[in-house]
Structure formats: structure tokens, C-alpha cells
Amino acid sequence: MQLLTLIMRTIWLMLPSYTPNNFAVIFGGGKPIDLGKNFIDGRRILGNGKTYRGMIAGVLGGLIVAHCEFLIEKLFNFHIFTTLSYLEFLKLAFVLSFGSILGDCFGSFIKRRFGVERGEKFPILDQYDFLLVSLFLAWLFCRKQFQSLFTFDVIIVAFILTPILHRLVNIIAYKLGLKDVPW
Ligand code: CTP
Ligand code: MG
């Protein structure tokens, strides 16, 4: 497969995992998931940056994006997600979106344990937490879909591309005033 096609295909496949955190940034806020509680080390479990509203908006946002992709494939007659049955697709879309938000929360949990405050950067973890958990859950719960779509080349490209896209999107979100810091 041509490199450019592979890159486009990878981004297309990863969009339900890439987009939830952007929806969380836009629509998040309010009650924190950890309810303001501390962990045994006296630091916050997750911190104020992980909220219920962000979580719900993130998962719904990812599902909406995935459905748009499904419709676009049908409309323009190219088949990636539409090689799956609708139910297989729905399950995969949910697992990727939910896994992305869960991974982001897990990343914050680790950050707090290292004493890294909310919003401070933690290279590598910030870029890969959501991707790793998304892909792991897809492998765990949607084995058939995972094996047919997330081929080895796609995963390699996803790992190379993700930090670049992550950086780019966060700089844009910062310039738009959606995020306080450009990471
Ligand atoms: N957000 C949210 N709920 C989530 C995830 C994100 O409300 N589950 C919102 C918060 O307003 C958060 C912003 O999106 O501040 C940016 O997300 P992120 O960079 O993941 O959080 P940080 O504030 O940087 O916190 P952390 O250090 O824990 O990553
Ligand atoms: Mg952050």
C-alpha cells in the first residue's frame, strides 16, 4: 500500500480514538470524576481536569464521529468501517471512544502519583495513554474487528503519527483559547 494511503487509512481508523479528548476539552467541566478526593499518597486521584461531563461528551463525540465516518464510507463507496456489520462497528466505535477517555484518565492517575499537577506536561504518557488503552480494549473486546482492521502496518503508523497529531491539535486548541497550555 502506498504510504500516503496507509497514513490516511490509519487516521481514519483512529478518529474515534483521537476525537473524544477534543470533545472533552470543549464540553468538559463541572464535577470531577474523583469527586475531589485524594489517593492514599495525599494527592488527588485524578484531579479537576477529568470531569463527568468531559467523559460523557468525549464518548458521545467519538461515537458521533465514527457514525459520520460510517455514513461517508457508504456515501462515497469506500469500505473500511463498513466492511464490518453495523453491530460490530458500533461495538468497536464505543470501545475505541471509551478506551480513549479511560486511557486519558489513567494517564492523569499516573501523573498525580508522580506529583505532576493538573495541566503540567508529562511527555510520552500524554501522547500515548489514550492510544494504548483504546487499542488494548479493542484487541480485548473486539478481537475480530481488531484483527481485520488494525493490521501491523496501521499500528506502527499510529504510534509514529499520534504524537505529531497530538502536538498539532493541542497547539491549535491553545491558539483558539480552548486549552490553557499548548500540550
Ligand atoms: N476534560 C474534562 N474531562 C475529561 C477530560 C478532559 O473535563 N475527562 C477537560 C478539562 O477541562 C481539562 C481539559 O479538558 O482541563 C484538557 O484535558 P487534559 O489535557 O486531558 O487535562 P489536563 O487539564 O491537562 O489535566 P491532566 O494533567 O490530568 O492531564
Ligand atoms: Mg493535559
Image: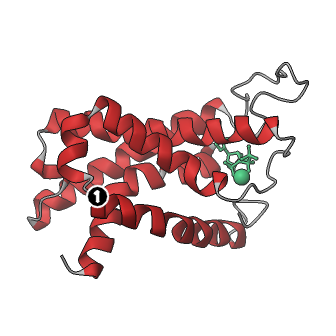
Name the quarter where the N terminus is drawn. bottom left
Toward the viewer: 101 or 143?
Answer: 143
Please tell me in which quadrant of the rendered image residue 52 appears. Answer: top right
Residue depicted at x 13% and y 44%: 84
Asked whether, in this view, residue 175 is left or right of residue 12, the answer is right
Residue depicted at x 69% and y 60%: 178
Tell me: residue 14, above or below residue 28.
below
Tell me: residue 31, above or below residue 20.
above
Please provide percent x and percent y for residue 25.
Answer: 63, 50
Residue depicted at x 15% and y 38%: 86
Q: Amino acid at mark 1?
A: Phe
Tell me: residue 121, above or below residue 145.
below
Please provide percent x and percent y for residue 12.
Answer: 31, 62
Please provide percent x and percent y for residue 77.
Answer: 8, 64
Toward the viewer: 121 or 34?
Answer: 121
One can see residue 56 in this view = yes
Toward the viewer: 24 or 152?
Answer: 152
Residue depicted at x 47% and y 68%: 160
Asked whether, in this view, residue 4 is left or right of residue 55, the answer is left
One can see residue 60 in this view = no
Disc 1 target residue: 152
Q: Residues within 10 Å of mark 1 (few under 14, many from 20)?
A: few
**Quick check: is the Cβ at mark 1 less than 8 Å away from ligand 1?**
no
Name the quarter where the C terminus is drawn. bottom right
Please tell me in which quadrant of the rendered image residue 122 appears. Answer: bottom right
Q: How many marks?
A: 1
